[in-house]
Amino acid sequence: MPINQAPLEVEDKSALVWLRWFADLADSLEGDWDLYTQSLPFTGTGSQTVNIQGMGATKFIQIQIDSTTSGSLTLPFTAKNTILEVWDSDTQTLIGGASVTGKIIQLPTTTTNILIKGMVILWIR
């Protein structure tokens, strides 16, 4: 959420305009900003490492899957439909995309080690 510049012309920090500004600032900083690893239900094969960094209404997702990959992952939240990048970890080349629909990340079928990354926007009603 964008906030206005601080009302520096008002010196009384208890003035209503300052209280509103601090409230807007607190609203814009909501969410979990720490990087954490979370196990997600995985219906495919291979070992996985999942990192999700929360930033309010958006989340940065990074998933490393080793060996043969197929199937899907289930997110602990609902996201707007998007495509995440799929990289070959060994050759460090972009090989495709992984579809995100609601809570499901549909993985491509590959026989290499892959890294899936990208930003998702939470579905808020």
Image (cartoon, grey):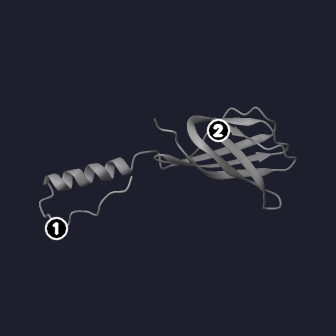
Instruction: Identify the residue at the far bottom of this view.
Output: 9
Three-letter code for the amino acid on which mark 1 is drawn: Glu
Q: Position of residue 58 (x, y in %)?
A: 51, 48
| CB atoms of marks 2 and 1 within 8 Å | no
Q: What residue is rendered at 52% in x and 39% in y?
A: 123
Q: What residue is rendered at 26% in x and 53% in y?
A: 22
Q: Position of residue 7 (x, y in %)?
A: 21, 63
Three-letter code for the amino acid on which mark 2 is drawn: Thr
Q: Which mark is residue 101?
A: 2
Q: Position of residue 48 (x, y in %)?
A: 73, 42
- Asked if residue 12 is positioned above or below residue 97 in the image, the reply reads below
For marks 2 and 1, the one nearer the N-term is 1
Q: What residue is rendered at 20% in x and 66% in y?
A: 8
- Asked if residue 105 is positioned above or below residue 9 in the image, the reply reads above
Q: Position of residue 16 (x, y in %)?
A: 15, 52
Circle 2 Cα neighbour tier, 10 Å, few/some/many (<14 / 14–19 / ≥20): some
Q: Which mark is residue 50?
A: none
In the image, taking residue 33 as reference, residue 69 lies left or right, namely: right
- Asked if residue 75 is positioned above or below residue 55 in the image, the reply reads above
Foreground residue among 65 and 94: 94
Is residue 19 among the parts visible in the rendering? yes
Q: Which residue is label 1 attached to?
A: 9
| Residue 43: quadrant of the picture | top right
Q: What residue is rendered at 16% in x and 67% in y?
A: 9
Front of the two marks 2 and 1: 2
Circle 1 Cα neighbour tier, 10 Å, few/some/many (<14 / 14–19 / ≥20): few
The answer for how far apart the CA atoms under marks 2 and 1 are is: 47 Å
Tag 1, which secondary structure?
Answer: loop
Instruction: Identify the residue at the far right of this view.
Output: 111
Foreground residue among 89 and 74: 74
